[in-house]
Amino acid sequence: MAMATATATATGTSLSGDSTLFSLCTFLLSVYTLGVSADVFISSTVQVARRLRVSETVIALLTAGAEWEELAVVVAAVAQRQPKIALGNVLGSCVANIFGAFSLGVLAQRQPIVQYDVSAKIYSVVLLGVTTGVAVLWGFGQLAGHVYGAVLVGGFVVYLVAVGWSIYRGVLDAPEESDAESDAGGSSSAGSDGGDPEGRATAAGDGNPHEEHSEANESSALLGRTRWRPSTLLYLVKLILAFVALSISGYVLSESSHSLAARFHISETVFGATLLSLATTLPEKLVAVISGYRGHPGM
């Protein structure tokens, strides 16, 4: 009897260890998949916007600024009836983005911070006021039920529409780097092509006809390779697949977080506000450091 009890205990301990290891590996893999799918989603959206001639500022505000990975985790946690993980993730992500991503981006700056326009300051003040009001009402216990959530979601939709309309009307400044780069590229190409035509004709006339023919074939082949561009449909397919992967990663991450919190006897709110929020904000920290180092403080 004692031997059977010891065997059962050892088997239970082994299964418990395997379950913990499986939950930990699933958590890490879902974090990696979440970051990769968010990156593909954003890049595909930018490419679609360029093909459709939509302002990249709108795309930046509606993709990177919308925190799709956080939204996927929160929606998955709420759908699984785990609101504590969703709440902890939201609170921890806000702290991690302000004290982590923003501060790292400032430290990585190689040039002074640019002067932001009036519209950006207005939107920042409005968002600060809304956040403060919600925090005060929440602190006094006045926020409860689905009505307030629906009102806040409606306000978020109105904000997105207002941002898009403001940029469309020219209230916000559009990035000028792409135009400057295209102008510089056009002038450099014009300068390289604007040489002496007689010199080019002389150089062409002095060469071997067979060599000229082979060089012409090679140049035409290279031009054919460089002119090929992926279609808009390909980027749309990548966009849809990335969104599906983003949603699945959020679901798996929420489930593995619940399992790890229960395994280590940690509160779901504490786990969501610490480890889960730090893991889901890694893409923002990476973007902040790289954009700051490359001299793009607006991003």
Image: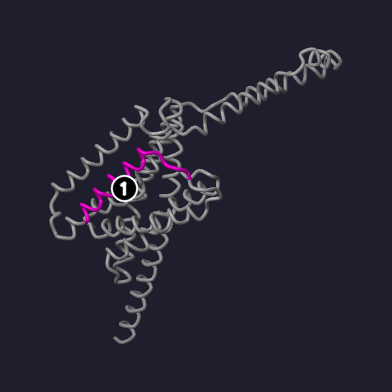
Q: Return the residue nearer the eye: 176 or 213.
A: 176
Residue 246's x, y, as percent?
37, 45
Mark 1 nearby-residue class (10 Å; few <14, some 14–19, many ≥20): some
User: Is-magenta flag for residue 130?
Assistant: yes
Q: Is residue 229 magenta?
A: no
Residue 148 in sight in this render? yes
Task: Report x, y in % for residue 225.
Answer: 62, 26
Along the viewing direction, whichever of 35 and 186 lies nearer the viewer: 186
- Label 1 amino acid? Leu
Q: Is residue 47 above or below residue 206?
A: below
Q: Using the image, determine if residue 101 lies above or below residue 61.
A: below
Q: Residue furthest bottom?
A: 2
Give how far across and how far down residue 84 sits, in percent. 24, 60
At 29% from the left and 37% from the top, the residue drawn is 160
- Magenta-highlighted residues: 114-135
Residue 40 higher or lower than 212, as above or below: below
Question: As displayed, is residue 102 above or below residue 264?
Answer: above
Please tell me which residue lies in front, 39 or 218. Answer: 39
Residue 267 in the image, given as x and y percentages of width and height: 27, 68
What residue sits right under mark 1 in the picture?
Answer: 71
- Magenta residues: mostly which secondary structure? helix
Q: Which element type, helix, strand or loop, lies under badge 1?
A: helix
Q: Residue at x 60, y 28 (%)?
A: 184
